[in-house]
Image (cartoon, rainbow, N blue to C red):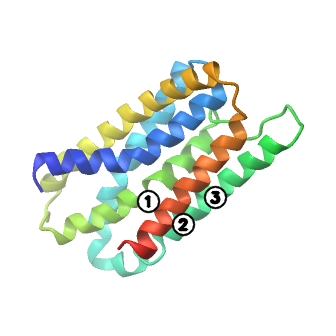
Amino acid sequence: MNTLEIWLLAISLAMDCFTVSITSGIIMRRICRRTFFVMAFFFGLFQAVMPFIGWFCASRFSHLIKDYDHWIAFGLLAFLGGRMIKEGLSNDDKCCFDPTRLKVVLTLAVATSIDALAVGISFAFVGMNSFMSILSPIAIIGFTSFVLSMAGNLIGVFCGKRFNLRTELWGGLILIAIGIKILIEHLYLN
């Protein structure tokens, strides 16, 4: 893979992180540097670590992972999205979906990075057979996810302030849509 292909791959992998970050920014409606950094850090970290894990385990476990990775991602995103929709439709002012909670951020980081695991498996099959050969791609993937997550949070805060959106409802629909997209890509487009 050449450098341009790696950057394009990194951007495509980071799109789910970007979208989830926009949703989180809309919910928060204020700039919270610490929360934005934590979210971007974990999104970037998981997007970088998952390809490494996929690459490392490709020879032993690829047949087990590729059949279920999309279902795991869909399940996590649908669960979180369903909770958000339920909260958006309830009359309670209390919001259980809190993007400032580390547990929520980690769940989202795992859900949005499962595709990166599959990419790591493909790295093993395209001739990247040493750690040094995948070091640059995983660094680019992690960096891109970090930057786009930070940008997504800022865009979300701007949209949340400008438009009176039912944030939990729309955020839940977006998370479920991302899960469905992952499922469709794996079931029908591969």
Among numbered discs 3 and 2, the one appearing first in the sequence: 2
Q: Earlier in the sequence, mark 2 or mark 1?
A: 2
Q: CA distance from mark 3 to mark 1?
A: 14 Å
Q: Residue at x 40, y 75 (%)?
A: 66
Mark drawn on residue 78? 3
**In this view of the protein, which residue sits in the foreground, 47 or 78?**
78
Q: Residues within 10 Å of mark 1 (few under 14, many from 20)?
A: many
Type of the residue with mark 2 = Ile
CA gap, disc 3 to disc 2? 10 Å
Residue 129 is left or right of residue 102, and the answer is: left
Residue for badge 1: 114
Relative depth, front residue between 100 and 172: 172
N-terminal-most mark, 3 or 1 = 3
Tell whether 101 sits left or right of 34. right
Report x, y in % for residue 184.
Answer: 48, 68
Please state which amino acid type lies under the numbered disc 3.
Answer: Ala
Q: Residue furthest right?
A: 91
Give percent across and percent down for residue 171.
64, 42
Q: Which residue is mark 2?
A: 72
